[in-house]
Image (cartoon, rainbow, N blue to C red):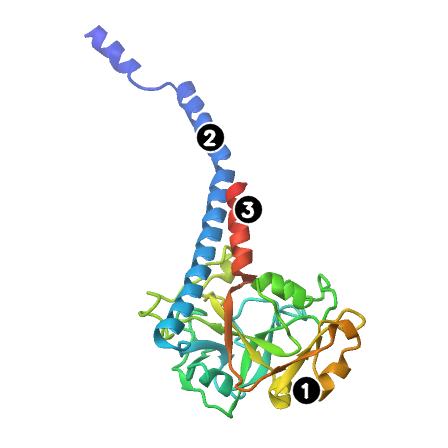
Amino acid sequence: MKHYNKMARQAGMTLIELTVVLLVLIGLAGLMIPYVGGFVSKTHDSVNSDSLSEANRAIQRYDVQFMGMPSAFDSLTAADLTTGNLYTKMMGGLGMGGLTNDYLKVVDVDGVVFTNVGITTLAPMDAAASSATFNSTLAPVSVTAGTTYKLAAINTNGGTDCVSGTDAMGCIKDDAALADILGREVNTTANDYILLGIGQASEMVGKTISEAPVHFAQNGDMSANNRYNRILAVFAVPNATTVTDGGFCTGKTSDGTTVVVASTMMTCQAAVTTPATAGTWTMVMRPKAEFLTTVMPMMMLEGLGGALNSHYNSVSN
């Protein structure tokens, strides 16, 4: 009996032993926390780059299968698209703390550039929606040639350096900086770069993509309920001047400027002052939107190339 009681007393852990075990567990947890944070970040980057790639491929597949772009993109401007303002729940610095030169602006676009490629409807944004992302649009409305629509476009700072604390975090200095983001050559003198959201109303959902992709921000304030987290499609469209003139002139001036807009083909060469790089007139016979790539609307605009670079950097670290 005494032997049984002695064994029973020895079956548990002493207070000192329990304290040692807890200290070991706390130490291991402290070592693991940085790694867990790294895993979350790597997963975030990987998922976002995959979403951008899949959305890009889905648009291209739709164009091949159905011989045109899908309709019913999210407009990113609210209510009446002919007078609408930028959706107030977009990520970015516009209107936040008085900062200027965000990567977003609103431009006038003739509906013909969309109808010429098969985009016949757009879904206006609902500023009163309970979720900034998941039920953020009104019913799609028709887009017609000859009607001017106000849509979101990429803004650049005209070659001026972006100033921290004055300009928004996502400020884009010039065409070269924008080209780095998009992974494409750009010409903001001749073109506007229109941003359209890939929402659940898009015609390609259920055809070339199962669900409209969502970018999940790491910051809770920028979550899908608070800010618009859909992937965006970037379309290059001739701006109003280019459409009116019937074309645009490219070349190099004496100071190295690579784009000159000329009002006619005849004035194109005269507008470029460097004889060795005389201007080339590009006709715009049938104005249309050209799909370029996909991007994520965060505090800074991130393109597919940037997302992949972040993913590979996080994996290697």
State left or right for residue 201 relative to residue 41. Answer: left
Q: CA distance from mark 1 to mark 3?
A: 47 Å
2 shown above or below 261 = above
What is the three-letter code of the residue carrying label 1?
Met
Residue 14, given in percent of the width and then of the height, sits at 37, 18
Name which quarter of the figure residue 167 lies in. bottom right
Give the numbered dot on residue 28: 2
Determine whether the residue tagged by mark 3 lies in a helix, strand or loop: helix
**Residue 205: which disc?**
none
Q: Residue 104's spot in the image, x, y percent?
A: 59, 72
The residue pinned by badge 1 equals: 265
Between the C-alphas of marks 3 and 2, the distance is: 26 Å
Q: Which quarter of the rendering shows the C terminus?
A: top right
Distance Cα–Cα, label 1 vs label 2: 72 Å
Name which residue lies at 69% across and 70% down.
Answer: 157
Q: Earlier in the sequence, mark 1 or mark 3?
A: 1
Q: Amino acid at mark 2?
A: Leu
Q: Residues within 10 Å of mark 1 (few under 14, many from 20)?
A: some
Q: Are marks 3 and 2 in contact (CB under 8 Å)?
A: no
Q: Residue at x 71, y 64 (%)?
A: 162
On the image, numbered disc 3 is attached to which residue? 313
Residue 50 drawn above or below residue 247:
above
Q: Judging from the image, what secondary structure is the residue with disc 2 in?
A: helix
Q: Which is nearer the eye, 169 or 108?
A: 108
